[in-house]
């Protein structure tokens, strides 16, 4: 279908207007920061707000993520942000990854639903699905050892609920040496431990979509030295992209018990997650001269290709057995985790910290990806739905069903560290030595079948034509011939990581210096196989048997000019090992070198508290060398990137008004590549400016506010031929404290129903947008 000249003109005009609006928004962010700085001196003299409430960026808060020994932000030489649970709820997040969009320096393409988010930090590219260079942690241990396993990303096994105490996010810096596969940063979800007595129960209802959610949490002391915490949620509905059936169903339960000892504490924890949610893939679009336009009947903000009119998807398991799967089940995940933690004072200044977790992770990933944006089949009829058997004359698309069984992603992880500090001259010398070990299973079974589908985002039906019969994988390819036979795969691999590390720090007066080193050894074993004509044959099984290692380093310095102003600088190098991303290419039996991904970073900046104004500014450079494989294009790439920029985080308070925000300005370039034509181009999806603003106002028992999250335009491909327009998303909330125990809240996500493209296929036929407007009401009772 051709886009008419009129439609093209309307779209071009609309996108130009959006671009101008984004430019104005970016200018507004810069102006707001300048205004806050200029007025801070005046407000300092007038404000009667307690000093602890003026610290809007929590610069005096001690952080434990990315540091060997906890330090306040003012003394640490790393870029780190913290978010309290109350701040998180104010941003109206719809999933764990969306929380991170309000943190400066974090690029979170959180448009996929409850998982499969593409995420990285300032300067480091998003070149594969997931979070290759960033580690998701719960209470200081990784959720998965790899952030970019195809169809199995860490955020799938994370849910934010009342059990979340706060978030600590480190960008760059010491993340290279204090975690494995985390040269870009660490995102640590920290759980409540029952220190604050009491609890709450709440119910949330979707007002413009069908969803009901129940939350609860409770913490208390059961004796003088023992406390417990328990919390969780249950949710049911058809999600913000209605599919005509129950698409969401599941919940989470977590609990811990802490025993205080005379020389420390011990804690046992448990988590059970069993959840079903939709996965939002890109939808068909038209791209003309690099300009994206929507297709009739497919709204990228709300389109869902889940439908009550699907048939069972017949797939192959590892034993060559046919099984029938329900496409509408979407993403199903199950996580059971048991953890043990201890911190013990051994005497003579020595402290032993131990963290252990054993997790089982499994599930199934089913989503519908448009293989084209218009199929040329003739003489089509409806195969399913109320019009079954009738002629169909509309637009059809080829729907590729990504159907992956998450057979076993279980892990066993342990982090043991010993630390002490000694008097040294006029200062204090601190030492930490540690050993991290992990065993990560990567056991997956891929199946990709093609179907002919009605081109509508609202309960589409399957279609028949002369070339295909609905319910069989027959359109354009037979069985494993989908995309060149790429996608009937059986993977059974295991990755053992052993990583000793050490840090040394020196503090004297205004100076804080530290250096750290880590040696990661990864031993991979197992097999992988690709089915031929829908049969796995032993003769085609390939061996995984290799070892890779790398020594990472980091060194930083922090100088406090006075109690309100500090300067810092850091240099580091770290590695992200590959897992399944290098399979089905070169041999993995140790006969040839195994490709890895290296990130080198330099950063410097300052932290300043000026009355009611707080700021945290970082200037950064990141150089990345990586290799990658894309399933949909069947191409291996090896690129090098160089990015420079500035990251700004600020907060301001004037009476009952608070404003926090930030901006990240990045200038990134592809400096080397197998494809020489892209050298000198801007990496895909790398916007020049990304910004956040969160104003709130309190009057009596009412708090209301908004969060504005936006981006300037970016390129959708490495050849810089497709433009993804800039956009901003406005979330709004109002909280009313009815009495001491009851609170009512109204939250709107994407209040103005903006379209915001976060990714597009390289040929421009499909793109993914943020979700459209959704409004929720919550009633909470605290006790």
Image (tube, rainbow, N blue to C red):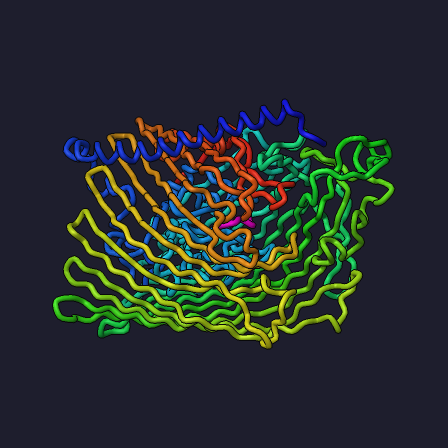
Q: Is residue 427 left or right of residue 397?
A: left
**Residue at image x 57%, y 56%?**
675
- At 78% from the left edge and 58% from the top edge, which residue is drawn? 322
Asked if residue 468 is positioned above or below residue 406 in the image, the reply reads above
Count of labels shown? Answer: 0
For the residue pair 333 and 782, the one nearer the viewer reads as: 333
Residue that lies at the very extreme toward the bottom in this rendered image: 591
Residue closest to the far top: 6
**Which of the two residues, 143 or 76, is positioned nearer the viewer here?**
76
Quadrant housing the N terminus: top right
Is residue 54 rendered to the left or right of residue 545?
left
Q: Taking the image as drawn, is residue 136 in sight?
A: no
Residue 584 percent location from the top left of the image:
65, 65
Q: Of 594 and 78, which appears nearest the observer?
A: 594
774 sits to left or right of 227: right
Q: Residue furthest front?
A: 677
User: Magenta stretch: residue 431 in it?
Assistant: no
Give coordinates of residue 203: x percent, y percent: 50, 37
State the image quarter where residue 269 is shown: bottom left
Q: Residue at x 66, y 68 (%)?
A: 528
- What segment carries the magenta color? 115-119
**Residue 87, position as x, y percentages in the image:** 38, 41
Magenta highlight: main SS: loop
**Whether residue 9 can be seen here:** yes
Q: Which quadrant holds the C terminus?
A: top left
- Residue in the picture at 48% in, 71% down: 497
Horizontal and vertical percent for residue 467? 85, 44
């Amino acid at each position: 279908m051709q886009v008419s000249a009129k439609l093209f003109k309307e779209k071009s005009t609309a996108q130009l207007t959006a671009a101008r609006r984004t430019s104005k928004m970016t200018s507004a962010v810069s102006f707001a920061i300048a205004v806050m700085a200029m007025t801070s001196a005046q407000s300092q003299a007038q404000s009667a707000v307690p000093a602890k409430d003026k610290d809007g960026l929590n610069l005096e808060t001690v952080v434990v993520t990315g540091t060997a020994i906890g330090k306040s932000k003012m003394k640490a030489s790393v870029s780190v942000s913290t978010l309290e649970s109350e701040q998180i709820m104010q941003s109206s997040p719809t999933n764990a990854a969306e929380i991170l969009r309000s943190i400066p320096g974090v690029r979170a393409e959180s448009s996929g639903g409850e998982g499969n988010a593409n995420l990285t930090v300032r300067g480091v590219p998003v070149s594969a699905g997931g979070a290759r260079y960033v580690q998701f942690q719960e209470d200081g241990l990784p959720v998965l050892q790899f952030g970019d396993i195809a169809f199995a990303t860490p955020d799938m096994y994370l849910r934010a609920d009342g059990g979340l105490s706060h978030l600590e996010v480190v960008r760059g810096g010491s993340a290279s040496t204090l975690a494995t596969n985390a040269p870009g940063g660490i995102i640590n979800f920290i759980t409540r431990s029952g220190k604050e007595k009491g609890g709450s129960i709440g119910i949330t209802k979707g007002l413009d979509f069908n969803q009901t959610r129940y939350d609860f949490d409770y913490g208390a002391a059961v004796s003088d030295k023992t406390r417990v915490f328990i919390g969780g949620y249950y949710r049911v509905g058809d999600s913000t992209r209605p599919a005509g059936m129950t698409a969401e169903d599941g919940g989470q339960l977590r609990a811990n018990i802490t025993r205080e000892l005379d020389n420390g504490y011990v804690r046992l924890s448990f988590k059970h997650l069993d959840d079903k949610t939709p996965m939002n893939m890109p939808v068909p679009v038209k791209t003309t001269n690099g300009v994206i336009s929507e297709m009739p009947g497919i709204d990228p903000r709300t389109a869902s290709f889940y439908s009550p009119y699907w048939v069972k998807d017949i797939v192959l398991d590892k034993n060559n057995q046919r099984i029938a799967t329900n496409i509408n089940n979407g993403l199903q995940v199950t996580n059971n985790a048991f953890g043990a933690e201890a911190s013990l004072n051994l005497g003579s200044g020595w402290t032993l910290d131990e963290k252990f977790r054993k997790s089982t992770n499994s599930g199934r990933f089913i989503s519908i990806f448009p293989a084209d944006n218009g199929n040329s089949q003739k003489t089509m009829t409806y195969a399913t739905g109320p019009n079954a058997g009738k002629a169909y004359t509309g637009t059809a698309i080829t729907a590729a069903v990504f159907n992956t069984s998450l057979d076993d992603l279980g892990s066993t992880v342990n982090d043991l560290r010993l630390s002490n500090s000694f008097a040294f001259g006029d200062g204090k010398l601190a030492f930490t030595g540690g050993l991290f070990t992990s065993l990560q299973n990567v056991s997956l079974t891929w199946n990709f079948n093609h179907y002919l589908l009605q081109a509508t985002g609202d309960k589409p039906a399957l279609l028949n034509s002369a070339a295909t019969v609905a319910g069989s994988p027959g359109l354009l390819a037979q069985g494993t011939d989908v995309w060149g036979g790429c996608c009937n795969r059986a993977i059974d691999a295991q990755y053992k990581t052993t990583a000793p590390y050490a840090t040394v720090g020196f503090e004297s007066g205004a100076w804080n210096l530290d250096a750290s080193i880590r040696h990661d050894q990864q031993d991979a074993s197992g097999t992988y196989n690709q089915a031929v004509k829908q049969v796995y044959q032993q003769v085609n099984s390939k061996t995984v048997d290799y070892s890779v290692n790398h020594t990472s380093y980091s060194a930083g310095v922090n100088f406090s000019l006075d109690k309100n102003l500090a300067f810092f600088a850091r240099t580091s190098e770290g590695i992200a090992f590959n897992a399944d991303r290098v399979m089905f290419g070169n041999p993995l039996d140790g006969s040839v070198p195994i490709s890895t991904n290296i990130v080198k970073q330099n950063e410097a900046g300052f932290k300043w508290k000026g009355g009611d104004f707080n700021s945290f500014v970082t200037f950064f450079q990141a150089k990345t060398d990586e290799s990658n494989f894309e399933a949909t294009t069947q191409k291996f790439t090896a690129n090098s990137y160089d990015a420079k920029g500035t990251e700004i985080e600020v907060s301001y308070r004037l009476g009952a008004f608070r404003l926090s925000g930030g901006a990240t300005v990045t200038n990134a370039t592809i400096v080397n590549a197998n494809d020489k034509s892209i050298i000198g181009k801007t990496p895909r999806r790398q916007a020049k400016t990304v910004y956040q603003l969160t104003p709130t106002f309190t009057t009596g028992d009412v708090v209301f506010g908004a969060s504005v999250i936006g981006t300037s335009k970016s390129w959708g491909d490495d050849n810089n031929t497709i433009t993804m327009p800039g956009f901003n998303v406005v979330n709004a909330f109002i909280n009313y404290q009815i009495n001491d125990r009851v609170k009512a809240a109204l939250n709107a996500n994407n209040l103005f129903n903006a379209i915001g493209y976060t990714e597009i296929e390289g040929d421009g036929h499909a793109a993914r947008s943020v979700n459209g407007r959704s409004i929720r009401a919550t009633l909470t009772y605290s006790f």
